[in-house]
Every structure is written in structure tokens, then in C-alpha cells.
Image (cartoon, helix red, strand yellow):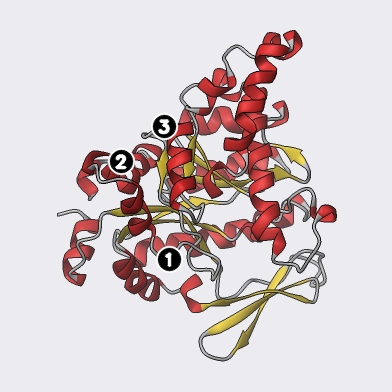
Amino acid sequence: MSQIQASRFRSGCTCRGIDVHCHVVPSSFPGAPGDETLPGWPSMTPVENCHATVVINDKPYRTVSDACWLAERRIEEMDRAGIAVQALSPMPELFGYWIDAAAAAILIRHVNDVIAGMVSEGAGRFVGLGGLPLQDIDLAIAELHRVVSELGFRGVEIGSNINGVPIGDPRFHPFFAEAERLGAAVFVHAVRPAGMDRLVGPAPLQQVLAYPTDVGLAAASVITGGLLQKFPSLRIAFSHGGGTLASLLPRLQQGYQTFPALKDSLSEPPVEQARKLYVDSLVFDADMLSHIVSVFGEDRVMIGTDYPFNFREKEPVRRIEQISADPTLSERLTFRNALAFLGMDEETL
């Protein structure tokens, strides 16, 4: 019996869902190397009722629950939601792209080690997607090797941009080449998105509106940059249902058919390239979920919840049941597509 099966058997869980979009925040952070006032370095301040506040640059960034670092707490809620396995990844603000690269490597190594500890403690209910200091490609590739070869992670989580540079930029090709060679899945999450100066309203609009916009632009950069033509075996997924890409794609396809310069720059039509990407189901609407399945394909959409944050999909399996009575499609969206993305064997479920 596999570890995942054993853990589920002990808990009485008959869950089969795989959630590819779940975050971890450590309960504590080490001091910043050399300079305890290093800009961007996080710390934790305990508060009441099993919560703590992440503090960055002497300002509260986000108050989080102990589900961010306690495996047992997560498993209880996974069982209620029908989730067998969570893919654990860093809270994006912990990528540290804006910190000195050597210091950022120390920070993200700490976060990855916390994830590894939770994976071990979870007895098969978790897999890891580590963070990388992508502002330095050599350091990022070194950490990629560590998390895959030493920690046994299924892949990595990266930002939609690295200090304003889209992930489709050729400077990141050495990283993607190594991820492809290692068979590591790459999950793309919004971070420090563009367009914040165009929003009118409170700070949470960054998550609500700016995140999916930045993810859509990141996915578009992968298409217009021909990333999957260069690395055809790369498994890459985008959070928040691919963001705005589903809406941008018809315009991109029409532009491909209208402008010779665009057509000449792409070796494959945008709509065909899009169906080689994976996306998660985090769109909060059954009709929109049906739409992204039609855009990206029945074999490319996976459960994503943004657990354990408050702004999340709390009943992901039920959302899938709302759009399909076909058991084959439901199985694909619930777990089979995620197995393929993560490079996992179906027998683990």
C-alpha cells in the first residue's frame, strides 16, 4: 500500500481530488543574513487564535492561520473538501525576487525545507513544488536540482514575472531547459503584478483583479515567445484558470491571422499552443470553468483552490460536479490531469 493510500485509509477518507494550487508559509523565518534590516526579508508576529502575521519592511503583509504550516490541520480540511493530495508551494511573496540573490537563495531554501518537512509529516498526502531565486539563473538551477533530486519534489512554482520581466523572455530559457530535462512540473503564480496604478479601491484588489491579469500576460508571453516549441516536453501550468488568457486568446489568434509579422514570429497558431498549457480551476464560477475547459481542453484543467487563504475555492470537487455529469470528464478534472502534470502514477490514488 502506498503512503498516500495508507494515510487516506487511516483517516477513512475516500477522496480522490488533487489540488495543485496550495500555499505554505513557515511558522518562523531565520534572520536576514548579514543585515537584519534587509529590505523585503519577512518575519512572523504571533497573534491570537492560531494565527500569525507576516511582516515585511516593518509592515503587516498578511495574517495567516496555522494551516499554513501544520500538516494535521490541512489534512482535516482536505478530507472535508474531497482532496486526496495537495501540491504545496510557497506563498508568492516569499519568492524574494526583489532581494539580493544570495540572500533570496537562503530564504527560499528555508521555505522549501519547511515544505519538505510537511511532505514527510503528511505521509503521502502532500507533494512539493519548490520556490527558486530566479533573479539569478545559476542559483535557481542549483535549487531546482536540490528540490527535485534531494527533496523529491514534483516540480517548482515560479512567478508570472521576475522583477517585471515576463517568463517568456529568452533569458529564462536555461532554467526551462533544465526543468524539462529533469521532468519537473512548473506552476506559474501571479506575483507583484503590473497595473496596480490602474486600480481604484482597497489593497485586496491586487489579488482579485491584478493577479489574473498578470497571469494572462505571462501565459501569453509563453505563447508569443514560442517556449513550448523550444521545450516541447515541458509541463507548465498557470494559476487562476490561466488568468485573462482565455479572453485574450481570440484576439491573439485574430492578430496571428491578420499581421504577417506576428504570424512569421510564431511557428504554431496561438489557439493550438494554448492547448499545450495546463491551467487550474480557480475561477469561482461554473460557466467560466466550462469555458476554460473548452479553451484549453478536457485534459488540461486541474483543481486549484489557493488553500489555506480566505480568498479561495472551498468546494472544488462540487464545482466540477456542477459542470459535468460525465464521470470520465469529472475524473480528468478532479485528479487525472493533475497526475499527468505532476508526473505521478495513478496507482498513488
Q: Which mark is residue 314?
A: 1
Residue placed most toward the observer, 320 or 276: 320
Q: Which circle's residue, 2 or 3, is located before the other in the chain?
A: 3
Q: Is residue 126 visible from the viewing direction of this image?
A: no
Amino acid type at circle 1 is: Lys
Amino acid type at circle 3 is: Gly
Left or right of residue 91: residue 162:
right
Q: Position of residue 41 (x, y in %)?
A: 74, 66
The residue pinned by badge 3 equals: 297
Residue placed most toward the observer, 331 or 73: 331
Q: Is residue 160 above or below residue 124?
A: above
- How crowded is the residue under tag 2: few (<14 C-alpha within 10 Å), some, or many (20+)? many
Q: Which circle's residue, 2 or 1, is located before the other in the chain?
A: 1
Q: Is residue 167 visible from the viewing direction of this image?
A: yes
Q: Position of residue 333 (x, y in %)?
A: 34, 44
The residue pinned by badge 2 equals: 332
**Which quarter shows the N terminus?**
bottom left
Residue placed most toward the observer, 231 or 101: 231
Q: Which circle's residue, 3 or 1, is located before the other in the chain?
A: 3
Amino acid type at circle 2 is: Arg
Quarter of image, res 294: top left
Q: Residue furthest bottom?
A: 48
CA–CA distance between discs 2 and 1?
19 Å
Which residue corresponds to the image point at 61% horizontal and 88% vertical from the top-left?
A: 47
